[in-house]
Image: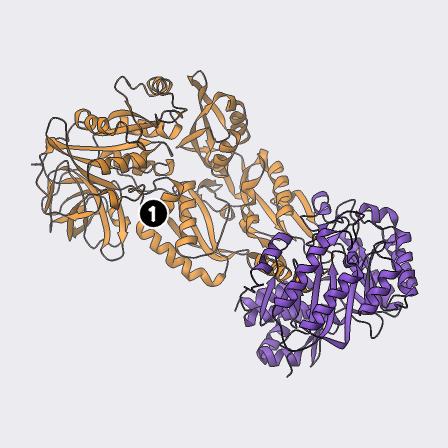
Amino acid sequence: MFIINYPQAAYLHIPFCRRRCYYCDFAISVVGDNATGETSQSIARYVDAICQEIQQGVKFDAPLQTVFFGGGTPSLLSVGQLERILAVLDACLGIAPQAEISMEVDPGTFTLPQIQGYTQAGVNRFSLGVQSFDDEILQACGRSHRRKDIFQAVDLLRQVGVQNFSLDLISGLPHQTLTQWQNTLQEAIAIAPRHISSYDLVLEPVTAFGKQYQPGEKPLPNDEDTAEMYRLAQQELTRAGFEHYEISNYAQPGFQCRHNRVYWRNEPYYGLGMGAASYFNGQRFGRSRTRREYYDWIEKGCPIISPVSDDTEILLETLMLGLRLATGINLDRMAANFGENTVTQIKSILKSERDRGLVHWDRHSLRLSDPEGFLWSNTILAKLFDQLTST
Amino acid sequence: MTDVSVSRIRNFSIIAHIDHGKSTLADRLLQVTGTVAQRKMKEQFLDSMDLERERGITIKLQAARMDYTAKNGEKYVLNLIDTPGHVDFSYEVSRSLAACEGALLVVDASQGVEAQTLANVYLALENDLEIIPVLNKIDLPGADPDRVIEEIEEVIGLDCTDAIRASAKQGIGVDEILEAIVKEVPPPQDTVEEPLRALIFDSYYDPYRGVIVYFRVMDGCVKQGDRVRLMASKKEYAIDELGILSPGQIPIDTLHAGEVGYFSAAIKAVEDARVGDTITLATEPAETALPGYTEAKPMVFCGLFPTDSEQYEDLRDALEKLKLNDAALSYEPETSTAMGFGFRCGFLGLLHMEIVQERLEREYNLDLITTAPSVIYRVTTTSGETFEFDNPSQLPPPGNREIIEEPYVRIEMITPEEYVGTLMELCQARRGEFKDMKYLTPTRTTLVYELPLAEVVTDFFNQLKSRSRGYASMEYQILGYRENDLVRLDVMVNGDPVDSLATIVHRDKAYPVGRSLTEKLKELIPRHQFKIPLQASIGSRIIASEHIPALRKDVLAKCYGGDISRKKKLLQKQAKGKKRMKSIGTVDVPQEAFMAVLRLES
């Protein structure tokens, strides 16, 4: 059996945003509506820091197959800043010739020359934070862009010849109805992106929404409706030719996000920047979520202080992540890593779920059904966690 | 140890409300008399259980012998006999007081007299003790000794002309206290020549030596090696070791009337040497036992079930061990359809119950589910037969019962007057009958009610505290049984009756209780993949119903590299929550739900 035990994927966190959206609890720093990579001192300082982290951090002797700039709003980086980070990455860790280099960009935050520059620097996949096509909903979410900015952003990408881009959508937003969601899906399909991420709103306690709203209560749609929105997305997007390859992700054949698949296969990765988590040498390590502490940590030489995951933890993580994928868990690999008994035990725990059509398995793989098994994935995982740790 | 004449012995205890400084004062006395060297001094020496020290209260009493040279140059032996400070243990308090000739009444100079203090002072007066009032914490800014003196004189009728103003913490007034003990507390009667009678005021189980009995010799002498008889348990033992408490155990050959000490004699459980029992010599026994002995009678009951059914045997062992040391604890196996195998346990009161539960969880590492506390009801059937029961499931069907009776208590509350209204509301809501109200001072009031004990055990104390912002205190005593129109309220979850949720309530309260109980359960039971009806019924008649809507999805939308640890924790929490739940049919019910009846608004 082949286990990749050195990271070949790197996530870089660019924590700057013009505003904080009302549903967002990420580690970000708000820099205001007019900030750009050229004008913002904070961004410049941060770019220095992340480059320093790459230079003095842990290195393995394998080139990166995937790079992902996430945020925050990475499109607040100037072309020069992005070029510099990629150059340092290439010099220190190496970037493979066919590597997937993704970047999250927000409508209204970039220009044509910027996209040209990013592409020339090597970015070959963009993820556009659309969330909704409805101006009222966008405003109610605290987004800085509007509907027209979305179409403009898509035009800019296409003008540069970028076809490999993804749209991010959110269902279950305040005041959203099933009909509106259906329209959102249709508009997204009409744009014909290569990839769509469709997230059911998560009400995080520390966010504006979390403080204001109760899950399933007005103005949020009830969970009967949000479950229906999930099913609708599955139905409409697969009908339009997208593969539903992960709980919240859809792709045209050949356009799954290679970087994100690394997480779901529980493979190692670098995580760089404030708030980012890395996973290698069996250690998961989350960097501090404030810039000050992150900078202090770099000053100390980027020590990775974290316990090494034990077998049970790795097993639970493998299940939790692998069952997000439509392809599910590879049972041959699971038997090789955790023993044939574990596989037998998992199957016996999930027998009633299989009878109810939520879980399927054959000789080589075990997966949740789409959409019903996915909709109950936490319940199923909690049951596995409970029973696999009780003996 | 030299022999000491009876006239030079002073036996006393300290009466105080929680936090009024009893333990600090005891520590100070031990220190000043040189009984415990400075360096050995742990804070609150007398409270040896961790739990006691944490809660700042004394559960099990102990004793200490101090040598003191008074200002008149004479040497005295002072025996401090500590008393537990809670109503649940009033029998134990009364026996400790019976072993003394005097008591220090310690009152916080800013707080004043509390209900508990009052109850214990009355016990002391019943036992004919000389009472020395001490105003403690006079160093604190809020201290108002004159007001508190007035209050003591008014409420207890005690002359406070010579009340001692002290601060145990600062060491102020400690010498005066020691002098007052010598001067005011009468020496024991010299009955050395009479047949041995010694009063047991405490006992505890030591795994190596068996039960250690703490006693006060009332008459006669006892020697190392004597064969003694316990007059209530009728058991006889040869004394292995006799000694005094200083406060550590120091062996000694003989103890005579007036002295306080301990013995061990390979006694297997404290039940065999209970507090209040009389020790006499097997060879020349006394004619009568000392007065005041009573059997322990549990008043409050609850079911204790292990969360994990594999811990049943461990729970049995733990209860057995606790019982060795706690004669008042009772338990018997109980089976519940919802909870599986466990024990129905009886306690002296609520604090006793809490202490036992905590010790089981803490010292024996058990994970327990507790059912709502209940009391002993008495039912007379149509065939004229009368029996007692504490488990609602034992109540015979309506057609077979003639009369149901429940225990009542007289409850005395002391409260700042602004809370009188809200406390009266509380008592009315708890089916209380108003008895009396008196002003202690222009701003403090005592309020007396008679209430069903069942209404007191269900969260009454917490309600009293929260309604009075912690200022009110209470004390209760059992009155006896009264007939009432009581019914059993059954609860069904998803159509299945849940025996552990059944309660006995007054018919007039059945509707509101049923309604709030189903509402509370709706809050506490998580949503499932199906709709769950919740119903409360009397017999076959449904009086309240609710339903928990079905959950439609349970999925984490996002899980990327940065989320993994956190999402795993969430799932682990969900899994753990599931573990701590009991399955009723296909419904997972969390533990809190079994205590839901306690948390209803009243």
Q: Is residue A72 left or right of residue B307?
A: right
At horizontal 59% and vertical 76% (from top left) the residue drawn is A342
Q: Is residue B320 left or right of residue A161?
A: left
**Label 1 neighbour load within 10 Å: few <14, some 14-19, many 20+:** few
> Which residue appears farthest toward the bottom when viewing the image?
A1
Relative depth, front residue between B333 and B155: B155
Relative depth, front residue between A161 and B591: A161
- Identify the coloring: by chain
According to the colouring, which chain is orange? B
Q: Which residue is mark 1?
A: B49
Q: Position of residue B277 (x, y in %)?
A: 23, 42
Q: Is residue B278 left or right of residue A254?
A: left
Vertical placement of B121 versus A371: above or below?
above
Relative depth, front residue between B544 and B95: B95
Q: Is residue B117 left or right of residue A92?
A: left
| Residue A14 position by quadrant | bottom right
Relative depth, front residue between A130 and B501: A130
Q: Position of residue A46 (x, y in %)?
A: 69, 57
Q: Chain of mark 1?
A: B
Tag 1: residue type? Answer: Met
Colour of chain A, in one word, is: purple
Numbered marks: total? 1
Vertical placement of A280 versus B447: above or below?
below
Vertical placement of A368 versus B161: above or below?
below
At horizontal 64% and vertical 46% (from top left) the residue drawn is B523
Residue B552 seen in the figure: yes
Q: Secondary structure at mark 1?
A: loop
Q: Position of residue B570 (x, y in %)?
A: 62, 58
**Quadrant in which the N terminus of chain A appears:** bottom right
Residue A371 seen in the figure: no
Q: Position of residue A296 (x, y in %)?
A: 58, 56
